[in-house]
Image (cartoon, rainbow, N blue to C red):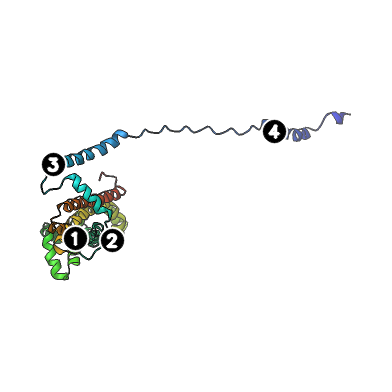
Amino acid sequence: MVSAVFHSPLGGLDDEAPAASTSTAAPAAAPAPVARRPRKPYDWNGLLLKVLPPLIGVGLLVGIWALLTMNGGSFPTPAATFAEAVKLFADPFYSKGPNDQGIGWNILFSLQRVAIGFGLAALVGIPAGFLIGRFSFLNHMVSPLISLLRPVSPLAWLPIGLLVFKAANPAAIWTIFICSIWPMVINTAVGVQRVPTDYLNVARVLNLSEWKVMTRILFPAVLPYMLTGVRLSVGTAWLVIVAAEMLTGGVGIGFWVWDEWNNLNVTHILIAIFVIGIVGLLLEWALVAIAKRFTYDEV
């Protein structure tokens, strides 16, 4: 009878353990909801300050233009110019012969020449800037030549291109090349010269090769200077191509302006001026956006 009433202590522990575990286990508590940060209200005032001043400036220009042409004359009014622009851009890519093509084709041909001349200038100018900034002997040797050739007017180089290449298109590309190379050379060289000497001293201690010094130390430090030179160069290239095409002929926005002047079509000339300005502005914005991705400074 005793054995039926009192159980072994070990057996009691074994029997009661599952019960204890089931009684003490509590359901997992649901994670507390993460408090969301309140959304920052959109800065409408900042947007207004960015958009409103340019609109006022453009409106002021158009208003002065309208006042000056309200009595008629040979100079077209803003309304007449806008109406003609709508007709012109209704079919910008027509082609009625080599000397009669739409304004879209003229813009594309000019951009093609700018891209080729500017690309060649970048391929030559950026490495040359690295070498000039890196080696003082080369800097002293080349700096007088740059100071001598850089102020030369772009159109002064055009006859040299016509003499050498015997064709208008490569002569125009040559003019773009020689005029847009200087900002890239100068800015890249200045950027290399402003690299802290501590960086180069560390490279000497680590016995890095000249190629690694260029790619691992100089290039990241010089990139903001180099992009500034690129921005200046592309603006120069776009300015030069308009003047060069006026003299060389063919297809291009510069030739289109000169051809419209020969036809005494002042309205189309005004439209071309606005188109040249807008394309140049878009190129500038694109390069500024690229530059901001690689530098923390204000561009």
Q: Which residue is mark 1?
A: 176
Give the tally of numbered discs.
4
Label 2 – label 1 distance at C-alpha: 32 Å
Q: Position of residue 247 (x, y in %)?
A: 13, 62
Q: Which residue is mark 2?
A: 210
Label 2 neighbour load within 10 Å: few <14, some 14-19, many 20+: few
Label 4 – label 2 distance at C-alpha: 72 Å
Label 4 neighbour load within 10 Å: few <14, some 14-19, many 20+: few
Q: Position of residue 51 (x, y in %)?
A: 26, 39
Q: Secondary structure at mark 2?
A: helix
Residue at 15%, 64% in the rendered image: 248
Residue at 17%, 41% in the rendered image: 61
Q: Nearer the viewer, mark 3 or mark 1?
A: 3
The quadrant holding residue 124 is bottom left
| Contact (Cβ within 8 Å) of mark 2 with mark 3 | no
Q: Earlier in the sequence, mark 4 or mark 1?
A: 4
Label 4 – label 1 distance at C-alpha: 85 Å
Q: Earlier in the sequence, mark 2 or mark 3?
A: 3
